[in-house]
Image (cartoon, rainbow, N blue to C red):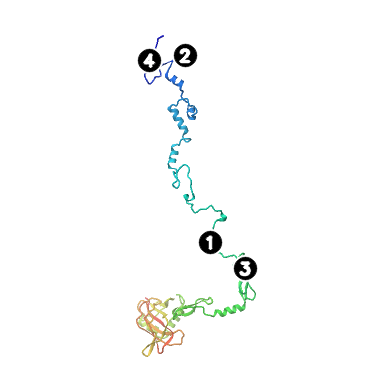
């Protein structure tokens, strides 16, 4: 046997190779050889994947693979995953400026500074609730049955007020009726004027068929003819012409001065509006009629009296094609006083002249002018 002295040998070439041999003195079993890997595995064997993941063996060695497998098994258990780490980065870091593992909050920290832990039975009435309650009637308030009525009582329950006997009023489920004496009393009241107000120069007129429905109106409105345009028969048209020419002068004057010798012809249309009434004839003749505002005649001028400021001008019921002829007369609402009218300007195609009313004596009564205009509409 060769005597080998380890200290006399040169250093081994590292790292050791799988073919290298290591001499092992195994005592009674003699001197033997082995390779480095077998010797390492024998002394510190590699842990299995299960052993690496459970972590219960503290003697076996861990390779990089076993280490990775062990770490991977703890992700999501004792180690945060990548997505869990992202959530952790964006998670709440503090509450109302308070940080730490344990944060204690008070009601002011979460915007509930006005909240009290009060039971429902002990909660106070709000200002709005009290305002609403103040609008309610107290149940002690009494419904008093006046003269001729019975019933009533406090508001702790529904109350009924009945019409008593001897009042002249009968009440059923469907109607309320009056006795003959009550109706007669109301008929007297129906004749009374119930229209306070009005302006100077206005008169009181019936506004509709309804009882006591009266209204203050101007004299123009009170005396206006109220009917719309319509077609007349030949006899009605002739009657209208006869009426218009009642003075025996109208048709002759119109034929010669306005129509060039032509006849007046049939009425084409006529009607009324806020500015009076008008008639239109096929020949082109047009006649309008309206009234002025009212006025007293009490301002002295020489030996007679005048109404004061001139009345008008007033708009025609329909426009003329050229300035028309005018006929103005004085009138009185009471039909007692007498007056005459005169123009102080010339009429136009759309308006009358301005008018003055005259009397021989002063009168504070209600006077107005009747305005008739004759001309052409085409």
Q: Decide if residue 283 is in sight here.
A: no
- Is the residue marked by circle 4 packed among few (<14), some (14-19), or many (20+) residues within 10 Å? few
Disc 3 to disc 2: CB gap under 8 Å: no
- Is the residue marked by circle 1 packed among few (<14), some (14-19), or many (20+) residues within 10 Å? few
Disc 1 to disc 3: CB gap under 8 Å: no
Q: Which of the two marks, 3 or 4, is nearer to us in this view?
A: 4
Disc 3 to disc 4: CB gap under 8 Å: no
Question: Could you say which is closer to the camera, residue 256 or residue 344?
Answer: 344
Residue occupied by mark 4? 7
Q: Look at the image and tell me in which quarter the N terminus lies.
A: top left
Residue occupied by mark 3? 153
196 lies above or below 157:
below
Query: Which of disc 2 and disc 1 is earlier in sequence?
Result: 2
Where residue 160 appears, x then y in whole percent? Answer: 62, 68
Residue at 57% in and 79% down: 187
Disc 1 to disc 2: CB gap under 8 Å: no
User: Could you tell me how far apart the alpha carbons at marks 1 and 2 are, in whole angstroms?
Assistant: 107 Å
Residue at 45% in and 39% down: 84
Tag on residue 27? 2
User: Could you tell me how far apart the alpha carbons at marks 3 and 4 are, in whole angstroms?
Assistant: 131 Å
Residue occupied by mark 1? 130
Say what secondary structure mark 2 lies in.
Answer: helix
Q: Decide if residue 296 is in sight here.
A: yes
Name which quarter of the figure residue 99 lies in. Answer: top left
Query: Which of disc 2 and disc 3 is earlier in sequence?
Result: 2
User: Could you tell me how far apart the alpha carbons at marks 3 and 2 are, in whole angstroms?
Assistant: 126 Å
User: Could you tell me how far apart the alpha carbons at marks 4 and 2 are, in whole angstroms?
Assistant: 21 Å
């Amino acid at each position: 046997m060769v005597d080998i002295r380890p200290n006399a040998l040169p250093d081994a070439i590292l790292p050791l190779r799988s073919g290298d041999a290591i001499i092992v003195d195994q005592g009674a079993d003699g001197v033997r050889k082995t390779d480095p890997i077998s010797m390492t595995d024998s002394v510190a064997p590699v842990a299995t994947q299960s052993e690496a993941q459970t972590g219960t063996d503290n003697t076996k060695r861990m390779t990089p693979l076993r280490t990775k497998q062990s770490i991977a098994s703890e992700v999501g258990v004792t180690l945060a995953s990548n997505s869990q780490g992202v959530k952790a980065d964006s998670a709440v870091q503090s509450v109302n400026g308070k940080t730490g593992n344990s944060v204690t909050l008070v009601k002011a920290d979460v915007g509930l500074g006005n909240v009290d832990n009060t039971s429902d039975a002990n909660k106070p009435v709000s200002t709005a609730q009290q305002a609403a309650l103040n609008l309610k009637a107290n149940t002690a308030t009494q419904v008093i049955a006046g003269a001729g009525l019975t019933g009533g009582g406090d508001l702790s329950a529904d109350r009924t007020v009945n019409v008593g006997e001897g009042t002249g009023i009968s009440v059923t489920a469907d109607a309320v009726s009056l006795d003959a004496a009550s109706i007669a009393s109301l008929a007297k009241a129906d004749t009374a004027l119930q229209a306070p107000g009005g302006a100077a120069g206005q008169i009181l007129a019936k506004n509709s068929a309804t009882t006591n429905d009266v209204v203050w109106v101007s004299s123009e409105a009170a005396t206006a003819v109220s009917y719309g345009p319509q077609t007349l028969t030949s006899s009605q048209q002739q009657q209208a012409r006869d009426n218009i020419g009642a003075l025996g002068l109208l048709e002759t004057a119109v034929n010669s001065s306005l129509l060039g010798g032509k006849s007046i012809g049939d009425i084409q249309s006529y009607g009324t509006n806020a500015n009076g009434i008008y008639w239109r004839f096929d020949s082109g003749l047009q006649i309008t009629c309206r009234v002025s505002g009212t006025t007293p005649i009490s301002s002295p001028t020489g030996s007679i009296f005048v109404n004061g400021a001139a009345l008008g001008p007033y708009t025609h019921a329909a426009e003329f094609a050229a300035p028309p002829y005018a006929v103005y007369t004085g009138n009185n609402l009471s039909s007692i006083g007498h007056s005459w009218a005169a123009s102080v300007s010339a009429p136009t195609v759309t308006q009358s002249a301005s008018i003055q009313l005259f009397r021989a004596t002063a009168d504070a009564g209600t006077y107005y002018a009747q305005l008739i205009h004759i001309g052409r509409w085409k």
